[in-house]
Image (cartoon, helix red, strand yellow):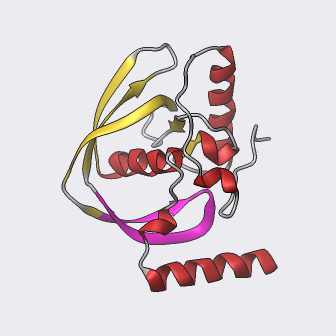
Amino acid sequence: MAGYTIRLYGDPVLKQRAAEVTAVDGALVRLVDEMVETMYEAPGLGLAAPQVGVQKRLFVYDLNDGRGPNAIVNPTISEHRGEWEFEEGCLSVPGLYFPIVRPKEVHLTGYDLDGNEVSIEADELLARLFQHELDHLDGKLLLEYLDGDQRKAALRALRNREIS
């Protein structure tokens, strides 16, 4: 059983900027453990704290590459290069996927759960995941990347799902 329920499009928590994490403590580690469990159950590759209703600048991820789950606290992207279009989905907008153009490479910094600074050069899928989760921390959903017609169709699909 997942530790949290994933918040869906329309929940106001998804539109708010998350607050900086000021202390890495046992409560934060428990939050991360429950977020990882929730992410795996969904299933997804990443999950930001606001998606479970927690307004902290933190996300978890696992690309299923054998390295296991990771958590990044207070992440920032300081550099980005190139451009890459890829079908992107979101656990808070379930079942919908859109071709989204994002930078192909990014440099992400933040902290791990031991309080150590991390610095990661990422490209393609990992870079996209970092950008997507940072958007959540800033109160932005992938629907904001769509043009007018795509956005109308997506909102219509979401409304129809609510009625069903």
Quarter assignment of residue 93: bottom right
Q: Is residue 59 magenta?
A: no
Where residue 117 sits: x, y (%)? 37, 19
- Tell me the residue at 62%/53% (across/down): 14
Is residue 8 visible to the viewer in this orientation of the structure?
Answer: yes
| 98 magenta-colored | yes
Which residue is located at x 27 percent, y 43 percent?
A: 106
- Where is 109 relative to 14, above or below? above
Q: Give x and y (percent) for residue 164.
A: 81, 80
Could you tell whether 98 is left or right of 38 in the image? Answer: left
Main secondary structure of the magenta stretch: strand
Residue at 70% in and 58% down: 11
- Left or right, 105 with respect to 12, comes to left
Does 109 sit above or below residue 125?
above
> In this image, 15 relative to 147: left or right?
right
Percent from the top left, x then y, of residue 58? 53, 34
Q: Which residues are magenta?
A: 85-102
